[in-house]
Image (spheres, rainbow, N blue to C red):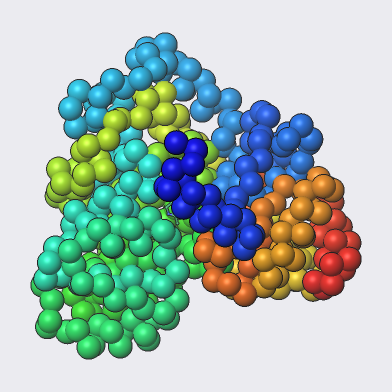
Amino acid sequence: MGNSKTTQHFKKKYQELVEKGETWELLKLMGPTGPRAVVEGKEMIVLASNNYLNLANDPRIKKAAAEAIEKYGFGAGSDWSIAGYTDLQEKLHKKIAEFKGTEAGLAFQTGFAVNSGTIPAVTEKGDVILSEELNHGSIIDGVRLSRADRIVYKHCNPSDLENHLRKIEGKYRNIFIVTDGVFSMEGDIAPMKEIQKLADEYGAVTYVDDAHGEGVLGEGRGIGVHFRIEKRIDFQMGTFSKALGSFGGMLAGDKEVIEYVRNTARTWLLSAAYPPAVTAANIKALEIIMKEPERVKRLWSNREYFKKELDSIGFNTGRSQTPIIPVIVGDTKKVKELAQKLFEEGVFVLPIVFPMVPRGTERIRNQVNADHTKEDLNKALNIYEKTGKKLGII
Ligand SMILES: Cc1ncc(COP(=O)(O)O)c(C=O)c1O
């Protein structure tokens, strides 16, 4: 066991990761997440969470989940495709369609399962996928599992996309353009209007990952509504695990498209339904997000303030256009030191290093929350300034 060849091999591989500073330390929250949270026993300002609208600990969502446990029990007992489907789940599918402004909606086990299952299910040999260079890992895995040819186009660069479309005209049965809506490490927005225009011109299908756009763009409805093209995007993928404060993935589109995916995506068909309590929480989260646009307004007001102040202190916030605001340091050791010092002073952030971002662009990814107070943000900014100066970053 402990001395087997395999164990030795992985000891060495793990040691290599440690030496390069590319391992993840797990920090423990000791209660609910929110604009502030108790992390490793200490009250911190949280700037590292996807909980943009502060819904993760919302009493209405908790109540909906608790009531569902009373009525349905905890476990679903099966896959949705077999014996785990409920009337509650059917209601959620209708709510997803209403939220996204499409004919049909489908809940998935996770957002990762949407991308890694749908892309290989809907693409075949003889098709081609044009994939954005900074797409999320779940898209990359989905594309790798597909039998279609693949081409990677440059980040937020419609003219590079068009060059590829021109070159491949007439060569493939179907062309799929797959992109993140908001890029999770940069915080910039895909030029979706131009991309959709090109897709229409070249007869391509569009697939958008809206994980960081929901609750943030389009009065909370996501990138489709933001650019007023929600009826034209073929596949709108999303997740309940970020602004919606819950768990699970979603897909929205035309009825036949959704029915096809439901009958062919292996991640949907061959994996257990999540508990009905999660379904009830997801329905409630969608209701809240559609009824309370003021949450989104508060998020943007905090985002504008925090980004402006970080810029004026002298940090490099890259191409951020959303509540994801990176502080780009460009050095693994230094970014880890910065994150550690911020943590010691009460700001919960994490260093993002290779392979999450290319070497030389190591960063801290800040994500503001609709319910951060000015006091929270100012405290974090003061600590950033003091620490950034001490480490020679600004
Ligand atoms: C852009 C993007 N897509 C998909 C996912 C996966 O979503 P989930 O957490 O629901 O699996 C994430 C989460 O990290 C993401 O950032």
**Count of numbered badges drawn on the protein:** 0
For the residue pair 17 and 158, the one nearer the viewer reads as 17
Residue 107 point in image, percent of width and height: 31, 39
Q: Quick check: 46 left or right of 276?
A: right
Q: Quick check: 343 left or right of 368?
A: right
Q: Residue at x 68, y 29 (%)?
A: 30
For the residue pair 56 and 164, the one nearer the viewer reads as 164
Q: Residue at x 41, y 65 (%)?
A: 135
In the depicted structure, whether residue 67 falls above or below residue 144: above
Q: Quick check: 384 left or right of 182?
A: right
Picture quarter with the C terminus: bottom right
Q: Residue at x 78, y 36 (%)?
A: 43
For the residue pair 362 and 4, the one nearer the viewer reads as 4
Q: Is residue 60 among the parts visible in the rendering? A: yes
Residue 235 point in image, percent of width and height: 28, 57
Q: Quick check: 31 left or right of 41?
A: left
Residue 143 point in image, percent of width and height: 28, 62
Q: Residue at x 21, y 47 (%)?
A: 265
Residue 19 point in image, percent of width and height: 64, 60
In the depicted structure, whether residue 365 falls above or below residue 71: below
Picture quarter with the N terminus: top left
